[in-house]
Each structure stands twice: as structure tokens, then as C-alpha cells.
Amino acid sequence: MKNAFLSVLFIALLAISSFSQNKPPTPVIDDDDVVKISTNLIQVDVSVMDEDGKQVTDLKPEDFEIYEDNKKREISNFSYTFVTTPMKGKNDQAAARKQNQSEMMKNLPPMPNSLKPNQVRRTIALVVDDLGIAFAGSKFVKDSLKRFVNEQMQPNDLVAIIRASGGSGVFQQFTSDKRLLLASIDKIKPNLTKIDSFAPLTNASGLASNQKYEAQMNARYALGAIGAMNYLIKSMGQLPGRKTIILFSEGFMFREKPLRPNSSGRDDVETDFARIISADSEIRQIYSEIGGASKVLTESANRAGIVINTIDARGLTEPSANASDGTFEEGQTSSGFSRNAEAVNASVAARRERLFDSQSSLLYLAKETGGRAFFNNGFTTAIQKSIDDQNGYYLIGYQPDEETFDPEKRKFNKFEIRVKNRPNLTVRYRSGFFGITNDKLPVKTGATAGEELSQALFSPFDVNGIDLELTPIFSNAGKLGGNSVNALLHIKGEDLNFLQETNGTRKGQFEILAVTLDAGGKTIDRVAKAYSLNLNQENYQKLVAKGLVYMMNIPIKNPGAYQLKVAFRDINNGKIGSSSQFLDVPNVNKGRLYLSGILLQAFTPQELQMRMQKVNAVSNQTSEAFKIQSDTANRRFRRGTNLNFGYEIYGAKTNSNNEARLQSQVKLFSENQLIFESQKESILLRGEKHKSESLITLGNDLKPGYYFLQVLVTDESAKDKKQTATQWISFEVIN
């Protein structure tokens, strides 16, 4: 956008008076570890529910009994942590969802919420075992995840959508940005090798004829899902507070005596599957590997303060016979065939046992970590109940004895926690822990400078050792140039350390690491560079005052949703800063209306007056382009500033005179509230390059803080009512 903003000009004075609101108190999370395992304190988190499934929050230490290996322990530490304020009832929840869908979704642009660790209220990972989910269940899972993001997710939630088949890249996607989460959900694909949840019925056993092959395939899918969750747990262990994993899966088999979900819940039973495992040593070894991996998974989750909730992705399931089973034999009926009822009944019974066997693993993962397992349940309801458990929890601690950590025994210490004289209450807690303290676990230490930079890059939180502002700007150069994304990085000058050289100059040394990820977590582009910068005293003082602007060109050919992550390190002082931004690259060839990214240029009232009178105007395009770059990258403006913003328009319908008639509107938001809305303005664009600009004045009464500027452009000549494009940019108002 080389030409300075020329097309449309309107000025809207914003004079917003401050006002106060009565807000409910914000709950606070304890920064300490939730689960503690040491020689002087064992601490575990506990949830208590009443008969209606609501959390009980008013219990006292004397209401609880805690046992370790059947030995009663005296409670020494006790507290209840409120994470969020729960809705009072179903009507309140429905009203909140309705408001979220109507007013908020209608009026607000898709604003990201960059959370700090102490702002996170709930950390939720929704894991889709797409390796083991049949084709039919994939769509229902995706629909439920979208409903969660659009209706149930709260502003201070930190969420990830994880695919078991997605590889390590997907674990970089913990975010509070709904756009990135919805794009990740769209990446979930069904396992086309598994069309149905059950193999065709056989005439003898619930297992397929090639039992060893089935065992190997089951192990492949199971170990893939468990491995993905183990990697996830390592990442989540670094996040604050109590965390939740919600696993969508059809389960996997590994126990010789599986837990029966349809019984009282915890009784061990023997099935055909269990007998076959016992009879074949090679098959037993395969399933033993899955069982061992599951135990490691639950132990890691418990020590990291993670609760695993499981949802059977088959939904409401009735493992009865169907037309694809082909259990017919030649007979004497008029049609020439008769159903062998005895064989069918035996096969259906075996299929039912297979269902229970596979659900056993889901029950096990939930039971061991204090979570819940949902079978024959609506997905949306199951997700809501799972995250409701994050509203709060008790922390109960006691002092262990020497036998707990006996190095010769290395035993598993089993918990039992009760609420006295309240049989109607349900108590959920972790099953126990192995007798080794956290400080004896292997810990990786001494990260190199490169590792520290990489850790900052993939952290779900911005690292603030150095203040960074990242602004990606999308544009399209037509058939010849295609899509172009320029990322502007503003580095606060006061945070940088320039060493004094003998010749009087100042020398700074920096490292930058940047990656572009698609919605599935795949790395599209990676930049790793080191720079040194020598400045004379005058230029050094300018840099300290105005900061350093770094521009990167990102080669993105295909349309889609992306995430850009950047980490910057000052070698001289070792400080690190990081930032990330969502980037939506549209398909401009589909004949729809699109807007480029927004460029900003700030003027004082005096500068604006001289500009309009063409007095002392910017002497050349190079210096003006530099100012636009600097202002767009910095995005910090004082009250009273005249803020010029410009953008390009793609896909506008033109008449025979190569003219496009459009309407534009500007909105300004602060703290999720619409504080300014301009009148709709008719604009006329001529020529091939459609550029537009506008001007607003940031009123002197604006409160310091972050604001979101939204531009809406409508093509009046388009027949499609949806021919409205929107773009937005955030900025900070300072005193």
C-alpha cells in the first residue's frame, strides 16, 4: 500500500466517559502445585458432587476421612479452591449460551485473548483418538467440539484440540483464540480404515479369526493415542493449576480382567477376551505393553495435576446384529435361507463383551486420575459435565510415614477418601501414587540458550522478558504475485542492551526464531537468524525511544488458518520475549469480497492539519512507508491522536466503467463492549487497485487500555447477501 491514504476520509470524535460497573469477585487459582508428593506432605485434589451432579463446596476437614493403603491418615492441610463461579442452573446456562450466540457473536469481532499464567482459570485439552474412532462417529465428535468452543468456552480458558494422529506439532496449539481452535477442529479426519465400530459378526467368538493380527492393530492404535497423550501431559505439566483432559475414544483392550462399566463400576470380570489373552503368550505380551503404557500415563497425569475424563465416541451404542453381518446359512425357507438364531445370539453376546472390554480402558483412565467416564451419553452434555468439575476442588494433605517411600518396596500407595455420614455424595479422587517423591524423579536441567528460545516460542503464554508486538499483514498481488504476508515485529527499545564500543558506538546482538504453523500444527515455514547492530549515539537514542521494527515476509501460498509464533532473544542480557498471532489467509479467487490487513498511521492534531493543508507534507514515499510500518508495528497511541487506517479490497464487483460501489462502517470495541459505531458511508472505487482509508480521532476521555478497531465493507452490487468483508486490528491507548 505505497500510496498514502487517499480515497475516503471521515472523522469521528470519540469522547467516551468512564463508568463503573458492579462486577462479581474474580476467583483466584493457587499458583502452587495441585498434587504434591514429598516426604513431609502428600497432597491430592478431590471433587465432591451431590445427587444432582453439583459440586459441594462447604465441607470441612472433619467431614473427610483419607486412607493410604487402608491406614487412616490425619489431615494436616485443607482448602477449597474456586476456579470459576458456576452457573446456578440449566436455565442460566441456556441463557448464557443464547447470549453468546446472539449478541456477543453478532457484535464482536473475533478478538484473541492473550492470557498470562495467573489469568488462566481452566486448562482443557480435548483429545480426539482419530486413530481408533470409526468413520461414523467422527462427524458427531467434530460437531460437539465446535459447540463447546462457540458456546461453552469462557474468556479465561486455555484450550487445545489434540488429534492422536497429529504428531508433535499439534501440541503447540494451547490457546484462548477460538478461531485457531475451530480451524484445528476442521483438520480432524476420520480413520477410513475403520468404517464401523465393530467387526462383522463371526459364528464362534467375539474376536476376529486372526486374533494376533487384531491384537497388533489394537496395539498400534492404542499406543499411538497413549503416546500422544503422554506428550501432551508433559506440556500440560508446565501449566498452572488443575488441568483437564477430555478424551474422545472408542477405547482399547489391555486388561485380562476388565472393569465393567455397566456393573456397579469397579468389579473385575473375566470375558472371552480375557481368556484368550491368558491362553496365548504372544497376544498376552502385546496387550501387556498397552497396559504398562496406560499405567505410566495415569501416573504422569496424577503427578502433573491432570484429570482425565473419557467419552465413548460411539455415543449411544447397542451392539446388535445388522444386515452387514451376513450370519445366514442355507436352509429350507421359501427364500432359500434361514437365520441361525443360536449363532447370531452367541455372536451378539460376544460383540457386547467386546464393547465392555473396550470401554474398560476408558473407565480405567478416568478412575485412576479422579475423572469421569461417559458411556451412552450425549457428547455436549458429557463435555459440560467434564468441565464443570473444573469449577473448584478440595486440596487435602497429610504427612506420610517412612513406609510410604520404602525404596525396597517401591510400592503403589492406594488412596481411599470418604465423606463421613454423607452416603448420597460422590467423591472423586486419584487412585494413588508410586512410592517415589517428586524430587527423585528425573529432571532435565541446564537448558541451552537455543533451547530456552525454543521453549519460549512454543509456550502457550507470551514470554515478557522483552516487550514484543507482532502484526501480520495479509495482502494479495493478483495472479502474478499471489498471496503475501508481511509480519511486523516491534521490539521495545528500553528492553534491549547495547554495549558501549571503544569507538563510541553501541552494539546489540540478537537472535530470532519464528515458525508458521497450519491449523493442524504442521510447520509451514521456519526462520532462525542471529543479528548484530552497531549504532551511533544519536540513532541509539532514537531506538531506545521508538523501538526496533523487524519485518518478515512469510511465504504462504495456500489459503487457510495459520498461527505465527516469534521468539526474540537479546544475547547481551539474555532476556527473551515471545508473541503469537492467528492469521487467516483467504481464497481471493472464489469471487467473494475480502480485505487485506489494516495499516495504521498516527498524527497529532498539528500534523494532521499540516497534512490536510499540504504544508510540510512527508517528502517522499520511502519515509512515509517507514512511518506506516513503524506505527502499525508499535500500535501504541496517545489520547487525542488522529488514527489513519488503510486497507485494500479484493473481489469487489465492478461495472462497465471499472467502478465499484461499496459501503463501509467502523466499530471500536473495548473489554468486549462496543463503544463506537460509525454511520455507514458509501464509497466509490475506481481502477484495478481498490484501496480505502479512514480516520478516527481517539478522544481525550478514552481510558488507557487495549482497543479493537473493526472495519466492515459491503458490496452493494453483489447479489449474495453475504458479500460483506470484515477486518480488524488491535491497539493500545496510553496517557
Image (cartoon, rainbow, N blue to C red):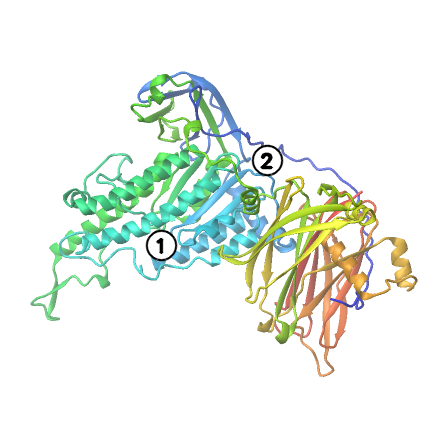
Q: Which disc is residue 590 wearing?
A: none
Residue 450, x across and y down, in percent: 56, 45
Residue at 33% x, 57% y is 134
Q: Up-down: is 564 above or below 119?
A: below
Residue at 27% x, 54% y is 217
- Left or right of 605? Residue 686 is left
As drawn, the residue found furthest toward the front would be: 502
Q: Up-down: is 55 above or below 588?
A: above
Which quarter of the picture shows residue 485? bottom right
The answer to whether residue 297 shows anywhere in this view is: yes
Kind of residue indicated by mark 1: Leu
Residue 266, x across and y down, in percent: 28, 34
Kind of residue indicated by mark 2: Asn
* Residue assigned mark 1: 131
* Residue assigned mark 2: 118
Disc 1/disc 2 C-alpha distance (Å): 35 Å
